[in-house]
Image: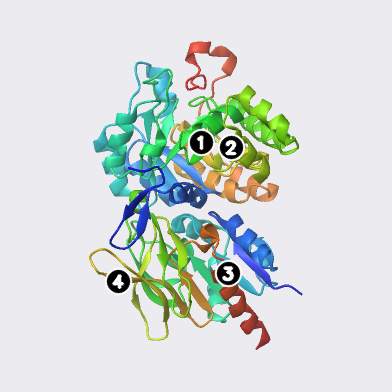
Amino acid sequence: MPLRIGVLALQGAFREHIQRLEALGAAAVEVRRADQLGKLDGLIIPGGESTTMGLVAERWGLVNPLRQWVSEGRPIWGTCAGLILLAERATGQKRHGQTLLGGLDVLVNRNFFGSQRDSFEAELQVAGWDAPSPAVFIRAPAVVETGPGVEILAEWTDPEGCSVQVAVRQGHILGTAFHPELSGDLRWHRLFLQMVEAGTST
Amino acid sequence: MEKNGYINSSNGARTGTYTVKAGLAQMLKGGVIMDVVTPEQARIAEEAGACAVMALERVPADIRKEGGVSRMSDPQVIRAIKEAVTIPVMAKARIGHFVEAQILEALGIDYIDESEVLTPADENNHIDKHNFTVPFVCGCRNLGEALRRIAEGAAMIRTKGEAGTGNVVEAVRHARSVLGEVRRISTMSADERYAYARDIQAPVELVNETANLGRLPVVNFAAGGVATPADAALMMQLGLDGVFVGSGIFKSGAPAKRAHAIVQAVTHFNDAEVLAEVSEDLGEPMVGINLDTLSEPEKMAHRGW
């Protein structure tokens, strides 16, 4: 049986994730309601606007089921807006703050790289990978502090020599500030499917 | 200045590439982009779940009412709106007015709408959008117009509809035209596509790319006349990727509630029970205009070529 991976489809680039997952032989499902979560092996929170996703999730009672998903140790991956939602702490939020799911012991700076003018593509060195990963950063966040249990998979250094984390993992939680669903580097989706496989076999 | 972006040699980051420009539009999908004229309205839009706002001096309904030449908004208005929210901020430049676009780029706007809602500045040429780091969205009525804009560098497309009317009929017409043509070319043979490209005055490469993908090569939103959650869901079910709402929100009786309802309707566009729930008790919608009462020169959709 193929792995069943849900992609949160409240807003954003969920279709791109679904295409990548299907290319790797997984069964991908658009998730809009809490009752869809039970049957899944893994979940992806895609890129989009984190405030929009947080507000729509709240309106349809998805916030607590998603928090429960994370606390039960089920595999989850957040890209860009998804990374923000999975962070325990965030700066640069909208006034009055925004809904976070938490679970990932990091501090995220929401629009770390600035406005769309500053969005960029680059080749990223990833810990343990031979070839660099083509990465697309769109009004991207960055991880600026990590807790003790967080493994750093990739860093980005700006021209001034200041480094931030852009790919992190904490057990069953994967977070990337960039968009593997846009660049087409399937290694990230493969890594997540391996995490899911490891989770279902234990 | 090269067409595929700018390279920052010290760390290899490439800004302004087409992937990066089209990528932001991909992140806006399934979302609602709302016209706002003040920072307070921008905050209401953000709290309602808008995925971006369009910063304006006047919404299209007022542009229609007041007449005169309509131009890019005062940078002060745009700056104030930018300060008020964390979501992307878009702004409009006149068709062909590349200096307005340069100013908007300098202001750090996230997307420029080269818009027929403003008075055109050039009756022959649109802006060469490849020359900018900031991405552009452009309106269209049919596939030929959409592909011409993409050839000029537009990284996102929307229907023109008929802005400021609260009447969705033109947006439906334009969406049906574009999506119907895409379906039609998907079944054409290669030789037929040459003739077709000539007929619709679009580059054959883009016709082929669209036919092979079975959709436009960029994100395609609805715009121009969307006023209710049902209108928004209609456009989504027709096959568009998201919705612009202009005058429809802040010209209605209860803007915050309506904005919130339209956001929910775009997420749950296929769920009639949810649509029924969010459509309840929204107060007065904007007063609409029947299009047969508008004379031809009063229609904005004819602007642009």
- Disc 3 residue type (three-letter): His
Task: Tell me the element at label 2.
Answer: helix
Q: Could you give the CA–CA distance between mark 2 and mark 1, rounded to whole angstroms?
A: 8 Å
Tags 4 and 2 both on a single chain: no
Disc 3: host chain: A
Q: Closer to us: mark 3 or mark 2?
A: 2
Measured as percent of width and height from the top left, residue B35 is found at 42, 37
Q: Is residue A101 above or below residue A113?
A: below
- Disc 1 residue type (three-letter): Ile
Q: Which mark is residue B150?
A: 1
Q: Could you give the CA–CA distance between mark 3 and mark 1, rounded to whole angstroms?
A: 30 Å
Task: Tell me the element at label 3.
Answer: helix
- Disc 2 residue type (three-letter): Leu
Q: Residue at x 68, y 63 (%)?
A: A22
Left or right placement of residue A124 versus residue A184 in this view: left
Tags 2 and 1 both on a single chain: yes
Q: Is residue B21 above or below residue A113?
A: above
Tags 3 and 2 both on a single chain: no
Q: Is residue A197 visible?
A: yes
> Crowding at label 2, few (<14), some or many (≥20) Cα neighbours within 10 Å?
some
Measured as percent of width and height from the top left, residue B17 is found at 42, 49
- Disc 4 residue type (three-letter): Ser
Q: Could you give the CA–CA distance between mark 3 and mark 2, rounded to whole angstroms?
A: 30 Å
Task: Tell me the element at label 1.
Answer: helix
Q: Residue at x 62, y 83 (%)?
A: A199
Q: Which mark is residue A189?
A: 3
> Crowding at label 4, few (<14), some or many (≥20) Cα neighbours within 10 Å?
some
Q: Could you give the CA–CA distance between mark 4 and mark 2, rounded to whole angstroms?
A: 40 Å
